[in-house]
Image (spheres, helix red, strand yellow):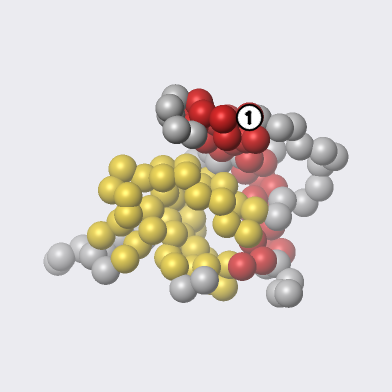
Amino acid sequence: MSKPDELLVDVAALVESERSNQMILTVVTGGAVITGRLAPEAVWRQRVSEVLADSAQLSEFSAAFTATKGEEKAPTHLHFHVARILQGTVGIPETGGMYRVAIEDVSAWTVGDFSYSDQ
């Protein structure tokens, strides 16, 4: 088990404080490169719950994402909104997705959106 990057935990804590939803990160985790905007966990959970509730096949899972958190503690996960997994010259999905990444699994990161260019 690796020790989470303290600076990354601090960044996640600022996002969790809901002072700003403008932080865009690119992380490497498990060999995947994920880039996108961070959201507070509660906002992320609510959005995932809404998407699931609108699905005929997955609506029963919606309630699992509306459960309230316990006591406040240092963040353990990053919650990406409108994020893409970068593979080759494309981002998957093109429109962005919702990803939850354990901070302790992040092996590298940078501030900002990373994308490929043909130029």
Q: For the residue carrying disc 1, how many other residues have a C-alpha within 10 Å: few (<14), some (14-19), or many (20+)?
A: some
Q: Nearer the viewer, residue 38 or 32?
A: 32
In the displayed orientation, state which residue is furthest to the front.
57
Q: Disc 1 on helix, strand or loop? A: helix
Q: Quadrant of the N terminus?
A: bottom right
Q: Is residue 4 left or right of residue 47?
A: right
Q: Nearer the viewer, residue 46 or 24?
A: 46
The total number of labels drawn is 1
**Residue occupying the point 82% across, 38% down:** 70
Residue positioned 49% across, 68% down in the render: 28
Q: Which x, y percent locates residue 102?
A: 63, 59
Q: Is residue 19 visible from the viewing direction of this image?
A: no
**Residue at the extreme right of the image, as rendered:** 71
Q: Residue furthest left?
A: 119
At x 62% / y 35%, what residue is drawn? Answer: 65
Which residue bears the numbered disc 1? 63
Q: Amino acid at mark 1?
A: Ala
- Is residue 27 in view? yes
| Screen quadrant of the C terminus | bottom left
In the image, taking residue 73 as reference, residue 91 lies left or right, namely left
Nearer to the camera, 83 or 11: 83
Q: Position of residue 57 (x, y in %)?
A: 45, 33
Vertical placement of 56 versus 20: above or below?
above
At x 57%, y 57%, the residue is 101
